[in-house]
Image (cartoon, helix red, strand yellow):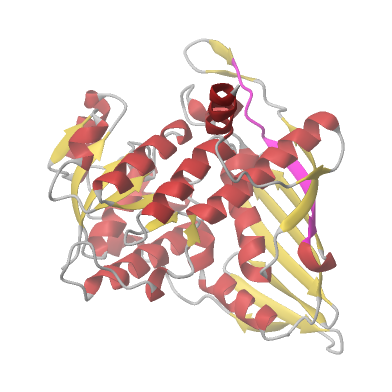
Amino acid sequence: MLRGVGVFGTGKIIRVLVPFLRAKEFRVEAIWGRTKEAAEKVAAELDIPFATDKVDEVLLRKDVDLVCIICPPHLHSQIAVKALGIGKHVVCDRPAGLCQSEVLKMVHAGQYYPSLISILFHTLRFLPAFVQMQKVVRDGYIGDLTICDVQVQCGSLLHDRYDWTCDELMGGGLLTNVGSHIIDIITYTTGRRALRVHGMVRTFTKTCLFKGIRQITSDDFCTFQMELEGGGCATVTLNEHLPGQFSQEVLLCGSEGHVVVRGGDLYGQKLTALKEEVLYLDIEDLKQSSVISHNSTLPSADNNINALLPKPYMKGLMKMIGALRDAFASQEDLQSWVKEPVAMAATFEDGQYIQAVIDAIRLSSKGREWVKVELLTEDPDTQQHLLSSIS
């Protein structure tokens, strides 16, 4: 018995997520938006039976068992914590929160309700090329890891109006929205976390016409280095100044060779070999017509699947939703699920680590120095309250 889903958010990606969920036999029962008008508009387009601007009206519905949080980042923590407390499974978009203390609340909620799914939409983990990369690295194809080098080039992440994507403090920016995926996939494929970071975060496009001119503070260029556990290092460059284009390359070098994911394909080369070999070739064709073309009410621009989300992330999303279906499919009890299909998914604990790295990179950029990555173990607000009560 597959679960009823409540969706939080009305952005363009919802128009892809909802058909994906239905393609995997989930029932989308309710949608939440910042305004009732926005929620009702998307509900009408996607044939969702219930729309509201009140969080509790979605969470308290008996036909909603799984919650997908794809709304502005400053709302992620409070919705996720409340949903878990009510007994709903949660899948949350990145970034998990605006700061570590927010994500830590999600971590504690997930630990308190271990019988519920609590994972993040870091979809690259489900892309077959990265699954294979992790396997060959683990099997010793490259030997001892020495260098990670990642390059991502894309167009602007800003929406067509002034919103949270324009504001660094609201979770906007290239580092938060793309860098979070890269930090996660480096850890997933190598099994190593960052100890220290050194970064530069810049906003080159500071103004844009949206119904008046407002200042943009979200970054559109970022480069950072990470010292990894075990002696390896990583260099990442993110650039969103190539309109209409997307390219992504993740390279891992070691003592015996290298592997690299370009787009959705995996290549490798031993130091003793004369040229690269194909380790995994993505021959799957993501057939747009089978998933979203039935939504004839969608604007033609929105039917361009690559315009909404780069193809590797889109394919990873489809695979992740398929894994969610497999986790639930054989279980009759609404609270029951099988862990194995989603075992590779990023947890809230992974989200806290990613946030710690992002915070350290921003601090490094401001101070122009190396910064240690430190994980919070308790909420600083709670700690301060206890110290005040003692004194």
Q: Nearer the viewer, residue 236 or 108?
A: 108
Q: Can residue 132 be seen in this view?
A: yes
Q: How many labels does the image show?
A: 0
Residue occupying image coordinates x 26% and y 51%: 88
Does residue 28 appear to the left or right of 282 in the view shown?
left
Q: Nearer the viewer, residue 96 or 266?
A: 96
Say if the magenta span includes residue 223.
yes
Residue 209 lies, with reference to residue 220, above or below; the image says: above
Residue occupying image coordinates x 43% and y 38%: 77
Residue occupying image coordinates x 68% and y 26%: 205
Residues in magenta, as a range:
215-228
Task: Indicate the quadrant where residue 86 lies.
Answer: top left
In the picture, the quarter occupied by the N terminus is bottom left
In the picture, the quarter occupied by the C terminus is top right
Task: Indicate the quadrant where residue 24 lies.
Answer: bottom left
Residue 267 lies, in percent from the top left, at: 68, 77
Instruction: Check the image and name the residue furthest to the bottom.
Output: 272
Residue 53 lies, in percent from the top left, at: 24, 28
Q: Can residue 276 be seen in this view?
A: no
Residue occupying image coordinates x 45% and y 58%: 314
Say if the magenta span includes residue 80.
no
